[in-house]
Each structure stands twice: as structure tokens, then as C-alpha cells.
Image (cartoon, rainbow, N blue to C red):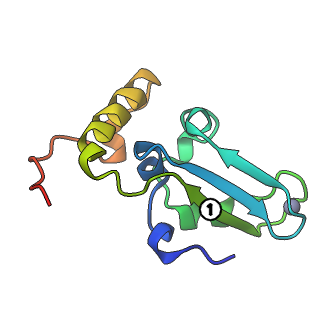
Amino acid sequence: MALEPHYAQARLVDLFERKCELTFRCLACGTGKTWRRDTMLGRARALLGLTLAEIQRRTPCPRCGARMAQLAVSGVWEPLDLAERFRWEAIEALRSAGLDPQALGYGWRPPQPRR
Ligand SMILES: [Zn+2]
């Protein structure tokens, strides 16, 4: 049930921005489900601002109702050179879906120093 601490405080929108997917697996019955981008902008859009720890606590298994989800994140967590492009793509995608990027913490930001 433990979520990697690295991901526990990440918000769903952070996964969305990095083009990652979130997989749930129920520890009680083994049912699995995966949230892809369409789910994050669709059914799960109200959860975009929540952390994975919060989502894990409040999302019951669709089959047995147990709140014993194991979460896994797939994708590239550190997009490095693509980070800025991914950020803009996320803002555009949120806007097109009728969501307010600013409400999710996006806004003007000074250019990040290159590492
Ligand atoms: Zn279950």
C-alpha cells in the first residue's frame, strides 16, 4: 500500500504534465486500472490538483470497494530538456479541455536556469 515517497506528494497534474500514467492495483482483489491522459482530463479532472497520497486514500476499488490501492507511475518522471515543452503542452491541453491552468498552479514563471 505504500506509495514511493517520491510520488506521494506529486499531484495528478504533475503526472499529466510529464505524460505519465497512473496505475491502480487493488491489494484486496487484484483488480487493476490505469488512468491515461484522457481519463485525467475526463472522469478524474476534479482530482488533478490532489496529490497521489490523497487520491490513493479516496479512490476505492471499482470491483470490491476496498480502499487498498497500490499506485504505480509509468513514464519518464524527469523530462529534462523537454520539461518546458511538456509544461506548455500541459497548459494548452488543460485549456482545450475547459480547465483553468492557473487554478492548478500554472502561470508565468521566469525561465529556469539550465542544469
Ligand atoms: Zn478490489
Nearest the camera: 85 or 71? Answer: 85
Horizontal placement of 69 versus 114: left or right?
right
State the residue at coordinates (30%, 48%).
105
Q: Position of residue 37 (x, y in %)?
A: 55, 37
Relative to 110, say whether 53 is above or below. Answer: below
State the residue at coordinates (45%, 72%).
6
Q: Which residue is mark 1?
A: 72
Residue sticking out furthest to the top: 96
Relative to 26, say whether 82 is above or below. Answer: above
Amino acid type for the residue under numbered disc 1: Ala
Query: Which quarter of the figure has residue 4?
Result: bottom right
Horizontal placement of 7 versus 42: left or right?
left
Number of marks present in the image shown: 1
The quadrant in which the C terminus is found is: bottom left
Q: Ligand 1 appears in which quadrant?
A: bottom right
Asked if ligand 1 lies within 8 A of label 1, the reply is no
Q: Position of residue 42 (x, y in %)?
A: 60, 32
Q: Position of residue 25 (x, y in %)?
A: 76, 61
The quadrant in which the N terminus is found is: bottom right
Q: Position of residue 5 (x, y in %)?
A: 49, 76
Nearest the camera: 1 or 95? Answer: 1
Query: Which quarter of the figure has residue 100?
Result: top left
State the residue at coordinates (40%, 44%).
17
State the residue at coordinates (36%, 45%).
104
Nearest the camera: 100 or 6? Answer: 6
Nearest the camera: 100 or 88? Answer: 88
